[in-house]
Amino acid sequence: MFVGKQIRLSRLLNTKSGRMLGITVDHPITRGVLPGIEDIARVLDEVVAGGPEAVTMHKGIAEKVFPPHAGKVSMIFKASAYSTQFHPYEEAIVADVDEAVRFGADAISVGMIVGGPEQTTQLTNLGRISREAALAGMPLVAHIYPKGSRMDDPNSADAVAYAARAGAELGVDLIKTLWTGSGESFRKVVEACPSRVALAGGEMGENLEDYLNMTREALDVGLAGVTYGRFVWQHDHPAAVIRAIAALMHDEASVAEALEIYEEQVARGQEAR
């Protein structure tokens, strides 16, 4: 491994646990300007205050909003986008590795939808960016979901394992994918993937306790990271949520202990006001 890649990975991974707690703010192209992300400068302030290892964003946000946080948190540079409304089965490439290097990113991120004929172009794109990232010493993160037009059950262990393994086969360092419903079924995904596996958030729970339970179960079968978004920055107390997740990931806290940390952080914040 090139020393540049080692240096960047060391900034992405927590020194205590070797895992990555990432937050994504790349949603508007995919899902529209959702409630809670309209004021992206405020969102980034609140997210960075929670102390995650990394934040994933597109180039325009990196240029216009991220500079005050440079050096405080790693940037994962998003290089593709899909739309749940306009092109739900195919990611468009919108940036490249050279740009990620110029922006000072610690990783480049590409999405890929598998499970349909649309994956052929995306496999080609991922293979190309994997090569360019390797040449530049840039870690590669990929959001790979089995949501293609021929996929019946995108949350099945077989489908998610296929998605994760596809990324590993093409050289991805950390693969963000879907929850399969239980720790036992998710174990199949982790065991099938020699790359690090990270968990997506989205609509996988209804409240903080649901997400903490999901995270704890996944960690217990070998999860290497999370890249959560909406449920964090749409929450009333994003920084407290991040610290609760960090307790699970880096300190091996139980769900009950993480909820206590969340309550303590909320109380401190209210006292500070």
Image (spheres, helix red, strand yellow):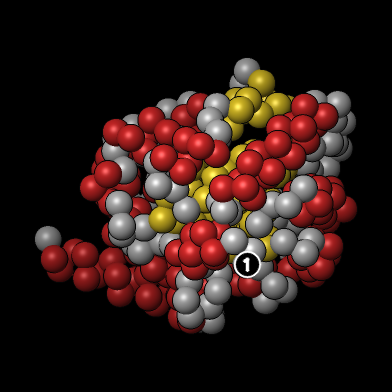
Q: Residue at x 40, y 41 (%)?
A: 103
Q: Is residue 266 left or right of residue 15?
A: left
Residue 269 visible, this angle:
yes
Q: Position of residue 39 (x, y in %)?
A: 29, 35
Quadrant where the C terminus sits is: bottom left
Closer to us: 197 or 215: 197
Q: Where in the figure is residue 30, as x and y percent of width and height?
A: 55, 29
Residue that badge 1 annotates: 224
Q: Residue 170 in the image: x percent, y percent?
A: 77, 48
Indicate the position of residue 217 as horizontal and vertical percent values: 66, 71
Q: Is residue 20 visible?
A: no
For the residue carrying disc 1, how many other residues have a C-alpha within 10 Å: few (<14), some (14-19), or many (20+)? Answer: many
Q: Is residue 66 left or right of residue 205?
A: left
Amino acid on which the number 1 mark rests in the picture = Ala
Residue at x 19%, y 64% (from the top left corner)? 270
Residue at image position (51%, 37%) is: 98
The quarter of the rendered structure image containing the N terminus is: bottom right
In screen coordinates, is 157 left or right of 143? Answer: right
Vertical comparison of 263 with 8: above or below? below
